Amino acid sequence: MSKKKDLGIAALCVVISDVVVLAVSAATAGTAAKNAQAELDTALAFLLPESTTFTPEAYDGTDEAIQAVYKGETGYVVETCTDGYVGKVVLLVGVDNDGTVTGLTVRQMEETWGLGAQALTDIDFLIQFLGTEGDAEVGSTVDALTGATVTSKAVARGVNAAVGFVTGADTSSSATTWGG
């Protein structure tokens, strides 16, 4: 009888802890969404510094690399998603109305640690894209991360797609391909 009682108490503890976790999760869901929006707002203002308000724009999806578009007073911030070596590389790219890259940040990636993952923090690599106008090409105008050519090309593809959206240029011919 004591084993049944112990099992009953253990089961009750599990149920109570599940209820507590669900309650905490429900209570913090709004906070998480607010924090995510605040982080996005900060990133948008940083990437297109002369704009103060940003409006999400509808996008028709003709360039599959473009995931979202935010219009500011002086340009756009475009969220892109391209194929890297291991997985998707998601960027936010600021582009002014003249088609010049004003800033970029890597939002998400799953690239190889010590190689492609350097794109998250390698300032010398990322700064090469500032001031470009849809002409970022690894090996020509941009030096690749050492040992991470595919990741470097994924970043270039995302930057060029963002500029192409703003300027109306066709960037489909610069798609990132394995080994290309």
Image (tube, rainbow, N blue to C red):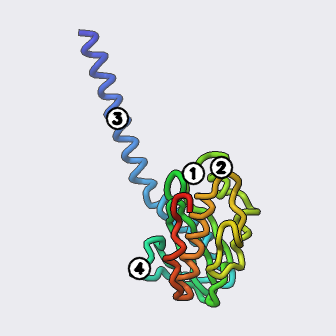
Q: Residue at x 65, y 71 (%)?
A: 137
Judging by the rendered image, the residue that carries numbered circle 2 is 115
| Element assignment for label 2 | loop
Kindly report the distance in space between the C-alpha atoms of the residues bearing marks 1 and 4: 26 Å
- The image quadrant that residue 136 belongs to is bottom right
Residue 82: percent from left, percent from top:
51, 64
How far, Cα to Cα, is label 3 from label 4? 50 Å
- Name the residue rendered at 55%, 85% in the picture: 166
Position of 64 compared to 111: left or right? left
Which residue type does callout 1 highlight? Glu
Label 2 near label 1: C-beta < 8 Å?
yes
Please report whichever mark, 1 or 3, sits nearer to the chain's N-terminal start: 3
Compared across the picture, whether 34 is left or right of 52 comes to left
Q: CA distance from mark 4 to mark 2?
A: 31 Å
Q: Please name the residue that numbered disc 4 is placed on.
A: 62
Q: How many marks do you count on the picture?
A: 4
Q: Residue furthest right?
A: 124
Q: Which mark is residue 89?
A: none
Q: Nearer the viewer, residue 101 or 74?
A: 101
Is tag 3's residue or tag 4's residue first in the polypeptide sequence? 3
Q: Find disc 3 in the rendering and name its residue.
A: 16
**SS category of the residue bearing label 3:** helix
Choose mark 3 or mark 4, whichever is in front: 4
The CA span between labels 3 and 2 is: 45 Å
The amino acid marked with disc number 4 is Thr
Q: Indicate the quadrant containing the N terminus: top left, top right, bottom left or bottom right.
A: top left
Q: Nearer the viewer, mark 3 or mark 2?
A: 2
Above or below for 27 versus 135: above
Q: Position of residue 131 (x, y in %)?
A: 71, 79
Mark toward the start of the polypeptide (3 vs 2): 3
Residue for badge 1: 111
Categorize mark 4 by other alpha carbons within 10 Å: few (<14), some (14-19), many (20+): few
